Amino acid sequence: MRPEDIDHYMSFQFQCMFFGLFKNIAVIRQSTWAWDNLWHFLYCLPVYMLFILQRGPAFISELLSVIPNSHYYKRGTYDLKKIIEYAKKKDFTSIIVVHTNRREPDALLIIGLPDGPTAHFKLSKLVLRKDIKNHGNPTGHIPELVLNNFATRLGHRVGRLIQSLFPQSPEFRGRRVVTFHNQRDFIFFRHHRYIFETKESKGSDANGKKAKDAKSEKTSQQKVITRLQECGPRFTLKLVSLQHGTFDTKGGEFEWVHKPEMDTSRRRFFL
């Protein structure tokens, strides 16, 4: 199955999922470790700290609405290691670095604080909220998190990193669900809110035994229907590398690195 076919298949898959356990994610660039002024970083603050959000690129603005207690800064010319040290002193729990190519996000880097790990993802098939038909607008409630099909040891490691981005006390009143679904090592992100609707359905009640001339009385019954409304954004992640500790390109120890020869078998998966 091609990645394009998987994305179409997910539209049906997400209609069948609601509640889950895990929370958090991030990505970098696949082809090269080119750290330039196009990088932006997103701080994920502790649950008890609330910061005013600043306006940024469209993708980051929507990412801020997904992850509670997060704040956006432009990176500028600051070195990433200095940013990490500053974030540790300010008691931040995670850093998400968004890389753009020609003003389009193409990679994410998620850094767990204070001791890592650091995950680098390739980002593709980004669809913003405004481009989703009949989209909903998310509320400020803490969402529920669904982590699906992270079955291996590496998958559990990535799942725990994603989980650390979200508070561990979801507000069910908001009816928000954030889903990270792993299929064939592609991580599909979706953001939904579930809606309960009451509709009237007509039924028939027969009096006595069934007969040809028996008359049935039509009664109206109320039936509760549950449906999902996508809030966006929508994107796909592909793990490029997982590094032990915080970001370090020279002396860092890599736990896992994707290589082209790993894609030769269609039956071997790593997450």
Image (cartoon, rainbow, N blue to C red):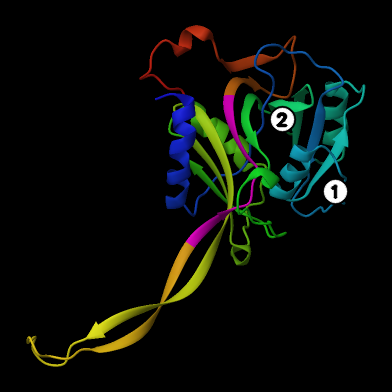
Marking on residue 114 = none
**Amino acid bearing label 2:** Ile
**CA gap, disc 1 and disc 2:** 20 Å
Q: Is residue 245 left or right of residue 1?
A: right
Q: Is residue 228 above or below residue 26?
A: below
Work out whether 7 lies above or below 231: above
Secondary structure of the residue carrying tag 1 is loop
Residue picked out by circle 1: 53
Residue 42 among those drawn in magenta? no
Residue 261 in the figure: left or right of residue 50: left
Could one spot residue 12 in this view of the protein? yes
Is any part of residue 93 visible from this angle? no
Image quadrant in which the N terminus is located: top left
Check disc 2 and report its element: helix, strand or loop: strand
User: Is mark 1 in CB contact (under 8 Å) with mark 2?
Assistant: no
Q: In percent of the image, x 47 and y 64: which residue is there?
A: 226
Label 2: few (<14), some (14–19) or many (≥20) C-alpha neighbours in 10 Å: many
Residue nearer the viewer, 42 or 128:
128
> Of label 1 and label 2, which has the lower sequence position?
1
| Residue at 71% over, 30% down | 111
Q: Which residue is mark 2?
A: 111
| Residue 63 x/y as whole percent | 72, 42
The dominant secondary structure in magenta is: strand
* Magenta stretch in the rendered image: 227-238
Residue that appears at 76% across and 24% down: 100
Circle 1 Cα neighbour tier, 10 Å, few/some/many (<14 / 14–19 / ≥20):
some
- Of residues 242 and 199, the one nearer the viewer is 199
* Vertical position of residue 121 compared to residue 88: above or below: above
Residue 105 is situated, as x and y percent measured from the top left of the image, at: 73, 28
Outermost residue, right side: 77
Q: Camera-side residue: 206 or 228? A: 206
